[in-house]
Image (tube, rainbow, N blue to C red):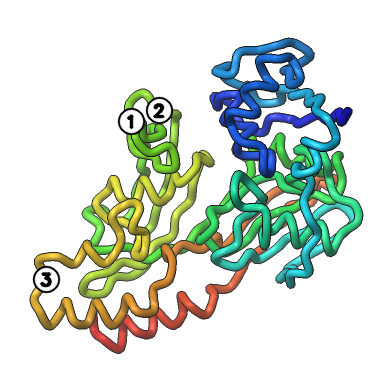
Amino acid sequence: MKNDILIVDNSGIRLDKFLADNIGELSRSQLQKYIKSGNITVNGKIKPVKYLLNLGDEIHINISEETFGAYFVEPQDIPLDIIFEDKDIIIINKQAGMTVHPGIGNRDRTLANALAFHYERLSDINGPVRPGIIHRLDKDTSGIIIVAKTNYAHIKLAEQFANRLVKKVYYGITWESWKKKEGLIDQPIGRKRNDPTSFLVNVNGKEAQTNYLVLQESQYFSYVNYFPKTGRTHQIRVHSAFSGNPIIGDAKYGGGLSRMKGYMPEISRKMKLLFKMVQRHILHAQKISFIHPRSGEEMSFEADLPIDIKNIISKIKTLNV
């Protein structure tokens, strides 16, 4: 039998959903079976599959080695863009298109696979499927992510995230001019009932707050810095779309090419030329600031805009849109 413990780094998520997000190739129905049978417990107690987890809960997993084999991350030789590294932490500039860790139907080419190849030992608080992973970025969001080498660093940094002491700055390009050039979007976010992979502003959702600042505008687009105060899934993308300014390339939240309907033919032609270069939602985790878990030193790191975003900015200027 395989025994392992996962420490919950989020609150308010269902037990079966949390496990499905974090355990390799085991399906949600399989996980529900193990929860009901008592092979998976929370803080040593059997809980229903719908149990809402709390930050810091310990999930104990006791499953056969054969079943659990798929739960481990396969090391894969994938290059990493390392901004900083010491004995406790690694600061990585994640490329767009890379998922942070394996999930159902997605075991390969993730950041976790790369970390498993390059490092023998990382924090294991979140289990072997998420070695060193403290927080996440969406697959198509590029930029800075912190990885913990030690459990001590992981715990200290997780506390900072939970207490909203980690400061993050994102850079995005959105459709249209913003009504207010600076402000706070304070709107709760919940999961869509008919599409569990999507989120929306919902009065019954979780608290979500995003400060923003419009840096510059073109005729049809805005260049924006976002300063999220909370860390909900898809938060910036949902809040930006809710404000009427979806991030370009973000078809899930109204920022795809269909947004240009109603434009004059000449403008539509230019938009189509631009969107040949847009292969993802244009959002980049540009800067992160936190307290070093061991030294107590204030640290801040930045990741330059990737070449695809720089090229899109240049194309917007060339097309005069």
- Structural crowding at the residue carrying mark 2, measured as other residues with C-alpha within 10 Å and reported as few (<14), some (14–19) or many (≥20): some
Mark 2 residue element: loop
- N-terminal of the two: label 3 or label 2? 2
> Is residue 163 in view from this perspective?
no
In front of the other: 30 or 78: 30
Mark on residue 202?
1
- 201, 197: nearer the viewer: 197
Q: Residue at x 80, y 28 (%)?
A: 63
Marks 2/1 in contact by CB < 8 Å: the verdict is yes
User: Which residue position is annotated with label 3?
Assistant: 263
Query: Can you say which quadrant of the picture contains the N terminus?
Result: top right
Q: Amino acid at mark 1?
A: Asn
Q: Which residue is mark 2?
A: 205
Specify few, some or many for label 1: CA neighbours under 10 Å numbering under 14, 14-19, or 20 or more.
some
Identity of the residue drawn at 82% across and 37% down? 66
Residue drawn 72% across the image and 47% down it: 133
In the displayed structure, does residue 196 sit left or right of residue 31?
left
Please state the horizontal and vertical placement of residue 315, each as a whole percent of the image: 34, 84
Q: Earlier in the sequence, mark 1 or mark 3?
A: 1
- Where 319 falls versus 74 (above or below)? below
**Residue 85 coordinates in the image, percent (x, y):** 82, 63
| CB under 8 Å between discs 1 and 3 | no
In the rendered picture of this protein, how many numbered marks are placed on residues? 3
287 above or below 196?
A: below
Q: CA distance from mark 3 to mark 2?
A: 35 Å
Amino acid type, residue under disc 3 in the picture: Tyr
Judging from the image, what secondary structure is the residue with disc 3 in? loop
On the rendered structure, is 97 left or right of 84? Answer: left
Q: Of all residues shown, which one is farthest toward the front?
A: 66
Looking at the image, residue 17 lies above or below residue 83: above
